[in-house]
Each structure stands twice: as C-alpha cells, then as structure tokens.
Amino acid sequence: MAWPARSPDLNPIEQVWVMLGRRIAGRSVPLGTLHELQQALLQEWALLPQQVINDTIASMTRRCQACISAREYHTRY
C-alpha cells in the first residue's frame, strides 16, 4: 500500500505525542526548564494507559481506509 510520507494521522507515535502534549499542557504548574519538561514527559508516559496506545494502533486500519477513500494524504481525525 502506498504510504503518504507526510501524513501524521497515519503515524501512531504522532497521535501518542499529541496525547502527551495535551497532558503536559493540562498540568497546573507550568514547566520552566528543559529538565522539568523531560521529567514531566517521562511521568506522563508512565501514566499513559497501555490501552490508549493499543486503541491508537488498532485505529490504523480505519485511518488508512479513510485516506484511501479520500485519495488524499491526510484525514480529519
């Protein structure tokens, strides 16, 4: 299957990064240093339920089918 090179919605890790970014942004205390960001990312990664990652991977068939149907390099997910 042709895989669009610049299609973040077809890359599961991009979806996980979005989830982590939202969790970091939702923290009550703003992060002031790169080290704090690194520690926060490690904490949020550890707290991210494995089922969320599994669901993201499982959605790939649907995402690919939507892209093929639209004949485009991105979807609206």
Image (cartoon, helix red, strand yellow):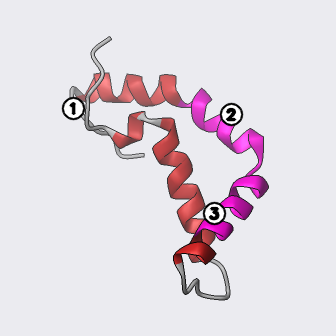
At label 1, the amino acid type is Glu
Examine the structure image and report whether residue 31 is included in the region drawn in magenta.
no
The mark that comes first in sequence, 1 or 2, is 2
Residue pointed to by mark 1: 72
Examine the structure image and report whether residue 52 is included in the region drawn in magenta.
yes
Q: Residue at coordinates 26% horizontally, 37% vertically from top-left?
A: 6
Neighbor class of circle 2 (other Cα within 10 Å; few <14, some 14-19, many 20+) is few
Residue 50, percent across and down? 76, 41
Residue pointed to by mark 2: 54
Nearer the observer: mark 1 or 2; the answer is 2
Q: Nearer the viewer, residue 23 or 35?
A: 35
At label 3, the amino acid type is Leu
Residue pointed to by mark 3: 41
| Vertical order, 21 against 1 (above or below) | below
The mark that comes first in sequence, 1 or 3, is 3
* Gap in angstroms between the C-alphas marked 1 and 3: 32 Å
Neighbor class of circle 1 (other Cα within 10 Å; few <14, some 14-19, many 20+) is few
Residue 9, percent across and down? 40, 40
Q: Residue at coordinates 78% horizontally, 57% vertically from top-left?
A: 47
Quarter holding residue 4: top left
Nearer the observer: mark 1 or 3; the answer is 3
The mark that comes first in sequence, 3 or 2, is 3
* Gap in angstroms between the C-alphas marked 1 and 2: 25 Å
Q: Residue at coordinates 24% horizontally, 34% vertically from top-left?
A: 73
